[in-house]
């Protein structure tokens, strides 16, 4: 399985994601939005903890599908506050390391539960 970053000349340089990812593989995992809820079912106490929980939940879904973080080709993340972008980016960096899947970050007015501050969905290919 090969995932090759695609960053065409003339497009804006990106720091933490690829403009696209060309995938050659057989196994595709679509991961539903993972929220900042811990194993006890309770939302984290703030954005940093909720982001860590959401990334851990996404990693668990990858593992259950026989995949790992490096197999992610696309993530879409939703935050409820623009002020939380820096904290989100810090936890994204910790979760992804040097891996740079295609990525979209959207600030929305609310998520399905008023206590949720972040939701992350992904697509992985192996």
Image (spheres, rainbow, N blue to C red):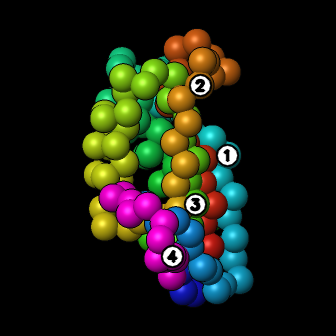
The residue wearing badge 3 is 74
Q: Residue at x 47, y 71 (%)?
A: 10
Which one is earlier in the sequence, the residue at label 2 or at label 3?
A: 3
Q: Between label 1 and label 4, give the one nearer the viewer.
A: 4
**Majority secondary structure in the magenta region:** loop
Position of the C terminus, as image quadrant, is bottom right
Q: Between label 2 and label 3, give the one nearer the viewer.
A: 2
The residue wearing badge 1 is 32
Q: Using the numbered discs, state the Cα–Cα distance from disc 3 to disc 1 in whole angstroms.
A: 12 Å
Residue 6 at x, y = what percent? 52, 76
Q: Using the numbered discs, state the Cα–Cα distance from disc 2 to disc 1 in whole angstroms.
A: 17 Å
Q: Which mark is residue 108?
A: 2
Q: Which mark is residue 56?
A: none
Badge count: 4
- Residue 22 position (above or below residue 96): below
Q: Is residue 41 visible?
A: no
> Which secondary structure lies at badge 4?
loop
Q: Between label 2 and label 1, give the one nearer the viewer.
A: 2
Q: Which mark is residue 8?
A: 4
> Which secondary structure lies at badge 2?
loop
Q: Residue at x 63, y 61 (%)?
A: 123
Q: Is residue 1 magenta?
A: no
Position of the N terminus, as image quadrant, is bottom right
In the displayed structure, does residue 35 sit left or right of residue 90?
A: right
Marks 2,3: beta carbons within 8 A = no
The front one of 98 and 107 is: 107
Q: Using the numbered discs, state the Cα–Cα distance from disc 2 to disc 3 in whole angstroms.
A: 19 Å
Q: Residue at x 43, y 46 (%)?
A: 56
């Amino acid at each position: 399985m090969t995932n090759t970053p695609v960053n065409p000349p003339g497009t804006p340089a990106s720091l933490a994601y690829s403009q696209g990812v060309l995938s050659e593989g057989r196994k595709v995992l679509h991961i539903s939005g993972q929220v900042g809820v811990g194993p006890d079912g309770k939302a984290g106490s703030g954005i940093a903890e909720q982001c860590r929980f959401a990334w851990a939940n996404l990693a668990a879904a990858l593992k259950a599908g026989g995949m790992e973080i490096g197999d992610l080709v696309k993530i879409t993340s939703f935050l409820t506050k623009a002020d939380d972008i820096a904290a989100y980016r810090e936890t994204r960096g910790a979760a992804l390391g040097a891996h740079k899947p295609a990525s979209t970050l959207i600030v929305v007015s609310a998520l399905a539960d008023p206590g949720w501050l972040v939701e992350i969905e992904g697509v992985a290919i192996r």
